Image (tube, rainbow, N blue to C red):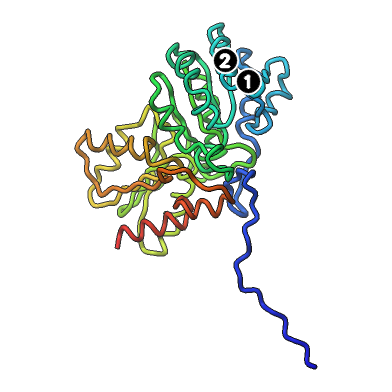
Amino acid sequence: MKPAAPRTDTRKPRLTTSAMIASIAGEGQRTKPAPFGHTLVELAKEDGSILGMTADLGKYTDLHIFAQAFPDRYYQMGMAEQLLFGAASGLAAEGFTPIATTYAVFASRRAYDFIHQTIAEEDRNVKIACALPGLTSGYGPSHQATEDLALFRAMPNMVVIDPCDAHEIEQVVPAMVRHKGPVYMRLLRGQVPLVLDEYGYSFELGKAKLLRDGYEVLFISSGIMTMRALEAAKALVSDRIDAGVLHVPTIKPLDAATILACCAKPGRLVVVAENHTVIGGLGEAVAGLLMREGVHPAFHMVGLPDEFLAAGALPTLHDRYGISTEALRARVKGWLT
């Protein structure tokens, strides 16, 4: 009997990325390890007021690097986020500069009132750096901080920053330490992509930066969606669509002047892209600004839906909820045709 021919498996390879892994770097993408932790250590060598504090998540917010360098200035508060932020406020009142880390869901949801009352209302010099922002975890709603920007934007005195990559984080950390008052920063941890160094970018607190110009589409983005917007803009070239990217890392205070100037250019589509629910984040902040100032471009928002998201592998979830590069490219093409 003639042996049967081997079967060819035409199925797509199964995505095996663990829901635990919060890496947003693409295959072969340049990365840098733990930019937050290493930058903080360098700052602390010169500034003795800097303290590192966490709620049982030092390893998972890259604060363990600080703990190894300055064990006598590191405070492990246990799984007690309210205690973490209350103690940070007290230490700030005594002249220290506490850097408090946890997951974004635990700061924005579990400890909201403690931050609101003891840090924001008192205008205390506490810096809050939170990992797993938006859809950077496959754990499901318990760990997906899809509404953190909306919550922290609502706090008076609070500066809110959503950095894009390792290059920017290395500049954000000293800037937020220099700022006198409370700061909330979305934290990318572990092997963090390198993107903005290719554009000669430098971070300035409260400033948006035009990374590339385009006469048909303007992406306005923050965080990892700036990386996606830049990738989509490059891909759209083959579709004969010219797209620009305005990076807005400081969500509050918003750089109104730069946003208005860029959106006032006639004849191009404005697309706000964010790794956050479409409720209360960058998109609605920009939309409100444009309406108040009487600037009315064609306008769309790309963000996470107003629902509890699924658990699973990040590439699958990013495609499903429309924040992958290909999903962003496809939506822009659809809006222009």
Q: Residues within 10 Å of mark 1 (few under 14, many from 20)?
A: many
Residue ranking furthest to the left: 294
Q: Where is residue 7 in the image (x, y as percent from the top left)?
A: 69, 79
Q: Residue at point 65% right, 55% down?
A: 16
Residue ranking furthest to the bottom: 1
- Res. 55 image quadrant: top right
Q: Residue at point 63% right, 64% down?
A: 13
Count all numbered tags in the image, as a single digit: 2
Q: Where is residue 252 in the image (x, y as percent from the top left)?
A: 39, 28
Q: How crowded is mark 2: few (under 14 residues within 10 Å), some or many (20 or more)?
A: many
Q: Position of residue 82 (x, y in %)?
A: 56, 19
Which three-letter amino acid code belongs to the residue tagged 2? Ala
Q: Is residue 283 above or below residue 106?
A: below
Return the residue at label 1: 53
How far separated are the C-alphas under marks 1 and 2?
A: 8 Å
Q: Are marks 1 and 2 in contact (CB under 8 Å)?
A: yes
Q: In this view, does 38 lie above or below 241?
A: above
Q: Mark 1 or 2 closer to N-term?
A: 1
- In the image, is 222 to the left or to the right of 295? right
What is the quadrant of the N terminus in the image?
bottom right
Q: Nearer the viewer, residue 24 or 44?
A: 24
Please tell me whether mark 1 sits on a helix, a strand or a loop: strand
Which three-letter amino acid code belongs to the residue tagged 1? Met
Q: Residue 88 carries which label?
A: 2
